[in-house]
Image (spheres, rainbow, N blue to C red):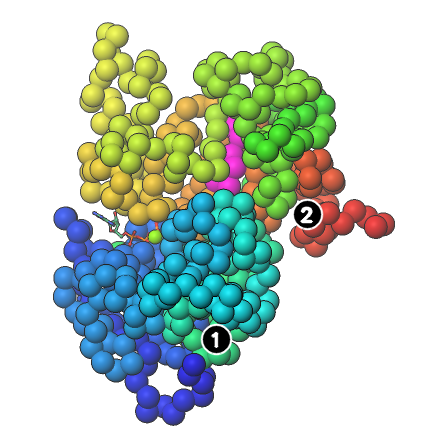
Amino acid sequence: MKQASEPASQPPLLRLDNLTKHFPQITANDCIHLEIARGEVHCLLGENGAGKSTLAECLYGFLTPDSGKIYFKGHEVRLGSPSDAIQLGIGMVHQHFVLVQPLTVLENIIAGVGSTRFFLDLPASEKRLKELANNYDLHLDFNARIWQLSVGEQQWVEILKALYMGVELLILDEPTAVLTPQEAEKLFTILRRMKQQGLSILFITHKLKEVMSVSDRVSVLRKGRLVSTVQTADITPQDLARLMVGREVVFKVEKEEINPGPPILEIHGLHAMNDKGQEAVCGIDLVVRQNQVIGIAGVSGNGQKELFEVLVGVRPATQGKILLAGEEITRHTPREIARMGLAQVPEDRLEEGLVPDFTIEENLILGLQHEQRFKQKGLMDFKKIRAFAQECIQQFEIAARSPLQTTRTLSGGNLQKVILAREFSARPRCLIANQTTRGLDVGATEYVHRRLLEQRQQGVGIILISEDLDEILSLSDHIVVFFKGEIIGQFAQADADIQSIGLLMAGVREGT
Ligand SMILES: Nc1ncnc2c1ncn2[C@@H]1O[C@H](COP(=O)(O)OP(=O)(O)OP(=O)(O)O)[C@@H](O)[C@H]1O
Ligand SMILES: [Mg+2]
């Protein structure tokens, strides 16, 4: 491994010269110049659709640039496939992992290393891997199968695999989007240690706090172009946001004082199981009023997802009842519940909420196609549908060429905007949203926050489940903290502070 302190005359580990990548009708990367130094954490920042993943995939040999040059350790390289990149020492952790679920941790890591494919000396490999894991404080059961691990743990496997293969440059595409705040902290510790060992990291994220805490330099992309590369120490989060979106970004949206109205959603003594048959919701009582946002804080996996699913009707309650506008809905079907005015933004919306091969327009009316607003004399009115789609694209700033573009070709954040636009248009009485802004850039996050507060102003009662405490604190009127399926503490917004909520999230009750 290289040491961090190399003579200045050394070429940068990686250099991009004029890299350009076109897709039909769009230039995703336009003459990009970029240098990544040895032992550097370099952040890549940019709005949804700016071209970050495309750039990363060109560096990993997954996509072939149309023009431009890539130099690795001073030599020009051609990356025909990811295995070329891996050979050179470039690794990548994708947002959607590519681990083989039925295999063990050890098998997954070792199977990735081509040279040992015909000669699997498991004990020796395991020994080497254990040393590596210890070195990075990554404690994993090597014999566990991938499907038994949490998403966070799967990411440790991906990282260990890259380290085991001897990468010198590791590319991480929005790794923290799937991590809890604690896991993200741990990831940063690992990245700092990698840096000490002289490794370089290209880190893609939307979270400015993360950029500030972990990176040495930041490169900002806007609409496929490199806007600037700066030293992190020389810049503020506000400036970064402005560079990214080309305007001032308000981090804290104004919330108007408003008195909550009558209860719209009442949850009484609710219990439910998780998929493993264990009790995951353990006696929840909660009342959501009109014009009120109830924030549910908590590390994910503490029953939030199950509560969400029971409320929208896809998971049975084992005990207790739920009333929507005074009417019991505990055993109603998802369709009935939706028709009665409960809208939802599920956590894994990409899996559940979209048909990738449909057009954007089709996805925008998915499930709503029978509504009167899209009809004329009982038939589908394509003009109305087109107008609706165009309005959604404009309002949510979905980076799309036309409503007829295939949804699959949108960037990660823009996929999410399609679903949000659809769900927000349903004029609900009550809205339950889980991790609404995950994966969205700062501009889009600001927009979604405004829309949520607008709904509150119009009388909608909102349950907002989020791991982002800043989001919870700035939007909620009342905050409850979930831990192991119970409400372990609650606060009026005015009395809430990050420290107390953070402790409760970790299960530390007052006086214990
Ligand atoms: N296979 C493809 N075909 C056509 N267009 C594509 C394809 N892949 C990406 N694009 C387009 O290229 C542009 C850049 O997309 P990219 O995925 O690189 O954005 P990103 O910066 O990673 O955004 P996000 O933050 O939302 O993940 C987008 O306009 C996207 O629609
Ligand atoms: Mg992306």
Number of on-image labels: 2
Q: Is residue 201 visible?
A: yes
Whether pointer 1 and pointer 2 mark residues with C-beta atoms closer than 8 Å, the reply is no
Identify the image quadrant of residue 264: top right
Mark 1 or 2, nearer chain start? 1
The amino acid at mark 2 is Met
* Residue located 23% across and 11% down the image: 379
- In the visual, does 99 lie left or right of 411? right
**Residue 433 magenta-highlighted:** yes
Question: What is the x, y in percent for residue 17?
Answer: 21, 73
The stretch in magenta equals 429-436
Q: Position of residue 67 (x, y in %)?
A: 14, 66
In space, the residues marked 1 and 2 are separated at their CA atoms by: 30 Å
Q: Disc 2 designates what residue?
A: 505
In this image, 130 relative to 408: left or right?
Answer: right
Residue 221: quadrant of the picture: bottom left
Magenta stretch: helix, strand or loop mostly: strand
Could you tell me which secondary element the residue under label 1 belongs to?
Answer: helix
Q: Is residue 61 magenta?
A: no
Is the residue marked by circle 1 packed among few (<14), some (14-19), or many (20+) residues within 10 Å? some
Q: Residues within 10 Å of mark 2 (few under 14, many from 20)?
A: many
Give the amino acid at mark 1: Lys
Between residue 390 and residue 146, name the one nearer to us. Answer: 146
Residue receiving disc 1:
195
Where does residue 192 sit, x and y in percent of width and height? 52, 72
Residue 239 higher or lower than 317, as above or below: below
